[in-house]
Image: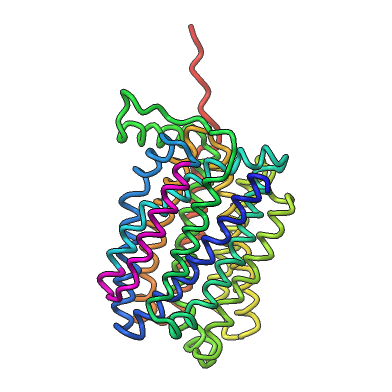
Amino acid sequence: MTGLRVLVAAQAVSLAGSGINAAAVAYLVTVRSGVPALGLVQGIPLVATVVCAPWIGVLVDRHDARRALVAASTVLAALTALMLHYGAWWYALVLAVRTPWEVALSGSLARLLPAAAARAAVPVAKASGTMSLTGRLATAAGVAAGPFLADTLGPAVFLADAATFAATAVAFHALRLPAPATATRSGTGVTRQFHEGLRYLHGRPLALYTAVLYTVAGVAWGAKDTLYVAYVDERLGLPAQVWAGPYGAAALVGETAAAALIASGRLGRPERIPAVATGAVLLLGGCLLTAAATTSPPVAFAAKVLEGAATNVVGVLAVTFVSLLAAEHMRGRMKTLLTTANRVSLGAAKGALPALAGARGVHTAYAAAGAAVLAGVALAALLPRRRPAPPRSL
């Protein structure tokens, strides 16, 4: 297998396990400890991501990417096995400790993917789209199987996720690709190299603009994760226990179609990415406003499919443009800066929108989210798109 195929297959296996993990955690904690406990279990790792991701990006850029993949996968396998012991606080702690290693795994993949794509003679955006397509399908399979496996096996279900990490560690160990350039480790502190990453991003105005769009999209993703069950029941008048699942899955249809389109290479030319990402985020805002206005199930489901497509387009293209097309020794920092900014907006939306839905109705929360997304695009448009011209010498 080529290096690209190994990366695609290993990520798919890992994401299938992560899908099982996420669904199993949601099921077990909700059944055994209640919904408030699930908020704790999901919230603490989100905070850990925001706190640690930028610094992990510096460390990722300093070390050999393949070895980092092996180390991260091995540690994640061991940490996941600790979830055999059930406890809401224990799960929150384990998932928070897993966070730096998950960030390192993601950043190291971003560093290696361009080399794998080059060796396979495949454009980077097309390779990124292929990974997104297989990853979405694998995640969906894991999420679908997770509750059943958790009900059948209990906490032993997490051995499946641990096994996927162990398998990917073996695959990454056998991977042979040219090592990307690394950032210097001597004479430069982690904080200074983090600031270097910020300056590097600021010096690429179109990349900065695209990163802001990716951050704005986090608001829409927060709405997607928290409002859909109440929306089906309150706004569409459908029994949530029957229709919430299909409504949520409608987004996956759009995500898969968009990933296939990106994998075909039709959207990934670098000069087009900021414009395409802009259109995708505008579509996200429009879908949220449509959800706020409609009570028609067919219209709502159609908007959900488009929302899923827009979600995947902006996600894949932003990571491609900001991180994968960055200088080799900066890719880890660019990927983790994207992750941090997006998680801040995602967390803010997850905190604010359910409260707004409870006070003013779910349609008001969707309207607020849509308006925030469109306002974010307008603010992003005010950023300078070109590097300032150097002053003329006298």
Scheme by which the image is coloured: rainbow
Rendered view: 242 above or below 11: below
Magenta residue check for 80 = yes
Picture coordinates of residue 322 (x, y %)?
53, 42
Q: Nearer the viewer, residue 160 or 380?
A: 160
Relative image position of residue 89 (x, y in whole percent)? 25, 71
Observer able to see residue 351: no
Residue at left offset 30%, top offset 76%: 86
- Along the horizontal axis of the image, is 90 left or right of 179? left
Q: Residue at x 52, y 53 (%)?
A: 377
Image position, residue 236 (x, y; %): 54, 87
Picture quadrant where residue 372 is located: bottom left
Work out whether residue 63 or residue 212 is closer to the camera in this orientation and state it: 63
Task: Give the residue furthest to the top.
Answer: 394
| Magenta stretch contains residue 305 | no
Please identify the dominant SS of the magenta region.
helix
In percent of width and height, residue 56 lies at 37, 44
Q: Quadrant of residue 353?
A: bottom left
For the residue pair 188 and 294, the one nearer the viewer reads as 188
How many marks on residues? 0
Q: Quadrant of residue 282?
A: bottom right
Q: Which residues are magenta?
A: 67-91
